Structures are given as C-alpha cells and as structure tokens.
Image (tube, grey):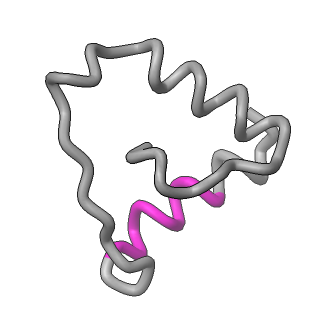
Amino acid sequence: MSGRWKVKHPNMQKLVKQAFASHDPTLVTYQWIPREENSHADSILNDVLDSGM
C-alpha cells in the first residue's frame, strides 16, 4: 500500500485500486510487519483468497 512494491497479479491489482479508493490516503499510515509476526492476519487473508472472494 505504500507503493514500494509492484502488484503483478491482475486480481490483486483490482483489490489494490479498491483499497486506495476506499479512503483518504492522508488519513492512514502503513507499517510493514513480517509475516511470522502477524500469522493470524496472514491466515485470514489466505482463507479469503482461497475462497475466491
């Protein structure tokens, strides 16, 4: 979301655009958290992606 990484997968590109359009970017900040330190959120995301949502 910070713009430092390019999203290559077409479905993920759509989600990134939706996320950016859903809020005023001046109202949020982003902080990278290593996957191993955020396993609960990673698990939820994987479940959503696997379900085809």
- Could you say which is closer to the camera, residue 45 or residue 27? 27
Residue 16 vertical placement versus 34 (above, below): above
Residue 47 vertical placement versus 12 (above, below): below
State the residue at coordinates (82%, 47%). 9
Residue 34: name its quadrant: bottom left
Judge whether residue 32 is colored magenta: no
State the residue at coordinates (84%, 37%). 10
Residue 20, percent from left and from top: 45, 23
Residue 39 vertical placement versus 27 (above, below): below
Q: Residue furthest bottom?
A: 36
Residue 16, percent from left and from top: 58, 32
Residue 23, percent from left and from top: 32, 15
**Left or right of 24: which side holds 16?**
right
Residue 31, percent from left and from top: 24, 59
Main SS of the magenta part reads helix
**Left or right of 41: which side holds 10?**
right
Residue 32: name its quadrant: bottom left
* Highlighted magenta segment, given as a residue range: 38-46
**Left or right of 30: which side holds 38?**
right
Quarter of the picture holding the C terminus = top right
